[in-house]
């Protein structure tokens, strides 16, 4: 007779040389703790472990490419026997789904390529007990409240979203600020800037602030120019000290491009002392 889980030989009544059976059982138990077993994964799906040969007496499994390696994600199925804790390292190029053979769990645990994890195997289900590195996700994008991958996010920063519920990637802000003392004359450049790196301005210059300490007498329109070409208007209304933004579509500056804010051709009689802060984002 053998034990139900590890298939260890049991000592029977009136058995001779009981020490042989006992010593074999001790050696098998030692193998459970200390030995690593490699499961060779080919294109066959699912990969079903056999209790008597490769699932009953080991705790550390590595999933390795066979001569014909897998070409897609695959299932690794344990027999329907309570096995307890096992540690699995996925050395293949595809994701392994860990389950009990003959079952169809709703959300079985998975192991991404190069990932490892600790699992509790019962007779009817598999539960994730922990991952490499002391538990939890082993990398940033495996968390439940972060972006799913890094694609297209080079040089972006991680920040909390506006709903304060998750992390998102965003381009860092790039502020351009200056002031112009006194009243600008006809076609005066009140802001001149040359880009040293790629930057992007949003439509309507969202988040930008342009103010004056002395209000305009009449409407005053300042031209926003990229390399001498108009991109829209920064407008002070009559008696206004805070500008609005008119017909400004999103635009970008590459390294070496010039940005100018140009005063009206007919200078306003009173508008004076401008403070300008334009908000862009890094484009590189």
Image (cartoon, rainbow, N blue to C red):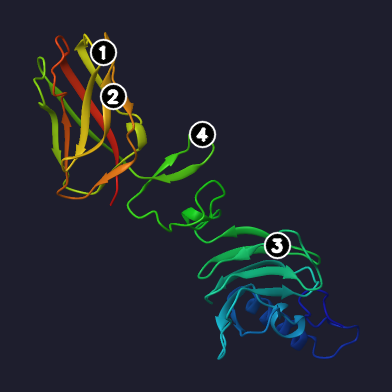
Quarter of image, res 45: bottom right
At which x and y percent is residue 144?
Answer: 57, 49
Per the model, the C-alpha gap separating discs 2 and 4 is 25 Å
Residue in view at x 24 percent, y 49 percent? 198
Q: Earlier in the sequence, mark 1 or mark 3?
A: 3
Residue in view at x 80 percent, y 83 percent? 9
Q: Earlier in the sequence, mark 3 or mark 4?
A: 3
Per the model, the C-alpha gap separating discs 2 and 1 is 11 Å
Disc number lying in front (1 or 4): 1
According to the image, label 1 marks what residue?
241
Per the model, the C-alpha gap separating discs 2 and 3 is 52 Å
Quarter of image, res 223: top left
Q: Earlier in the sequence, mark 2 or mark 4?
A: 4
According to the image, label 3 marks what residue?
108
Residue in view at x 49 percent, y 55 percent? 141
At which x and y percent is residue 267?
Answer: 13, 17
**Residue contact at pointers 1 and 4, CB within 8 angstroms:** no
According to the image, label 4 marks what residue?
164
252 up-or-down from 177: above or below? below
117 up-or-down from 54: above or below? above
At which x and y percent is residue 99?
Answer: 72, 68
**Residue contact at pointers 3 and 4, CB within 8 angstroms:** no
8 vs 115, nearest the viewer = 115
Lateral position of residue 155 relative to residue 189, left or right: right
At which x and y percent is residue 74?
Answer: 64, 75
According to the image, label 2 marks what residue?
209
115 vs 243, nearest the viewer = 243
Per the model, the C-alpha gap separating discs 1 and 4 is 34 Å
Of helix, strand and loop, which one carries label 4?
loop
Q: Earlier in the sequence, mark 2 or mark 1?
A: 2
Disc number lying in front (2 or 1): 1
């Amino acid at each position: 007779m053998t034990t139900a889980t590890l298939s260890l030989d049991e000592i029977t009544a009136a058995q001779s040389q009981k020490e042989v059976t006992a010593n074999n059982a001790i050696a098998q138990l030692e193998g459970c703790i200390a030995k690593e077993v490699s499961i060779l994964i080919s294109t066959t799906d699912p990969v079903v472990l056999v209790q008597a040969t490769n699932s009953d007496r080991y705790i550390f499994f590595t999933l390795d490419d066979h001569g014909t390696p897998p070409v897609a994600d695959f299932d690794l199925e344990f027999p329907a026997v309570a096995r307890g804790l096992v540690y699995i390292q996925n050395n293949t190029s595809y994701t392994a789904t860990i389950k009990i053979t003959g079952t169809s769990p709703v959300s079985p645990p998975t192991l991404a390529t190069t990932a490892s994890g600790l699992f509790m195997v019962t007779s009817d289900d598999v539960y994730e007990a922990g991952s490499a590195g002391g538990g939890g996700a082993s990398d940033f994008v495996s968390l439940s409240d972060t972006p799913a991958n890094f694609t297209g996010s080079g040089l972006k920063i991680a920040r909390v979203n506006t709903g304060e519920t998750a992390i998102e990637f965003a381009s860092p802000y790039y502020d351009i600020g200056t002031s112009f003392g006194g009243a600008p004359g006809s076609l005066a450049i009140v802001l001149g800037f040359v880009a040293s790196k790629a930057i992007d301005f949003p439509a309507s210059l969202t988040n930008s602030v342009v103010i004056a300490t002395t209000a305009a007498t009449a409407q005053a329109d300042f031209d926003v120019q990229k390399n001498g070409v108009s991109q829209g208007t920064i407008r002070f209304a009559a008696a206004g000290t805070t500008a609005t933004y008119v017909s400004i579509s999103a635009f970008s500056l590459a390294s070496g491009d010039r940005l100018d804010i140009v005063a009206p051709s007919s200078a306003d009689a009173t508008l004076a002392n401008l403070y300008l802060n334009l908000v862009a984002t890094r484009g590189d």
